[in-house]
Amino acid sequence: QVQLVESGGGLVQPGGSLRLSCAASGSIFGINDMGWYRQAPGKERELVATITSGGRRDYADFVKGRFTISRENVKNTAYLQMGSLKPEDTAVYFCNLHFTINYRNYDYWGQGTQVTVSS
């Protein structure tokens, strides 16, 4: 089994910064993607950023230039450095781990961490 544990959420003022962490443990295939998604009240879950085990990054347009995703493969840990935060960034942020073995997709999710941007 695979477990993902997120940390680092909280309350921050507009324009502030937060760093989220996601530690994965268990039976993890070495070649994998890790990503961050978010879900605001009344809205669907949306992609924020992903990073492959090789280091390729992709970002949603609404976070480009403000957020940075990174990872430490040795620790199976991903990070999301969030800056210039806006009230509309308020959401529960979920970590995702994805890999494919023999054409079968595996997706695992963390429990989510609340990020609230408010003055």
Image (cartoon, helix red, strand yellow):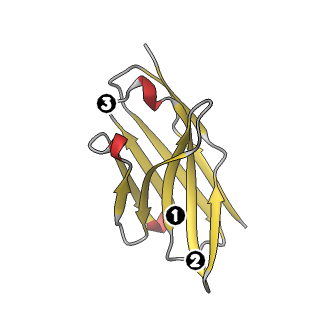
Q: Which residue is mark 1?
A: 76
Seen in the picture, residue 91 relative to 100 is either above or below; the reply is above
Looking at the image, the residue that sits furthest to the top is 119
Q: Secondary structure at mark 3?
A: loop
Q: x, y (%) of residue 10?
A: 52, 28
For the residues labelled 3 and 2, the Cα–Cα distance comes to 34 Å
Q: For this rendering, which residue is in front, 22 or 117?
A: 117
Q: Which residue is mark 2?
A: 100
Dot placed on the residue nearer the N-terminal end, 1 or 2: 1
Check the picture and name the quadrant holding the C terminus. top left
User: Residue at the spot x=67%, y=45% of the render?
Assistant: 111
Query: Which one is in front in this view, the residue at disc 1 or the one at disc 3?
Result: 3
Tell me whether the residue at label 1 lies in contact with that at label 3, contact meaning CB atoms closer than 8 angstroms. Answer: no
Q: x, y (%) of residue 39?
A: 57, 39
Seen in the picture, residue 22 relative to 25 is either above or below; the reply is above
Q: x, y (%) of residue 99?
A: 56, 72
Left or right: residue 98 compared with residue 80: right
Dot placed on the residue nearer the N-terminal end, 3 or 2: 3
For the residues labelled 1 and 2, the Cα–Cα distance comes to 16 Å
Q: Which mark is residue 84?
A: 3
Dot placed on the residue nearer the N-terminal end, 1 or 3: 1
Seen in the picture, residue 85 relative to 56 is either above or below; the reply is above
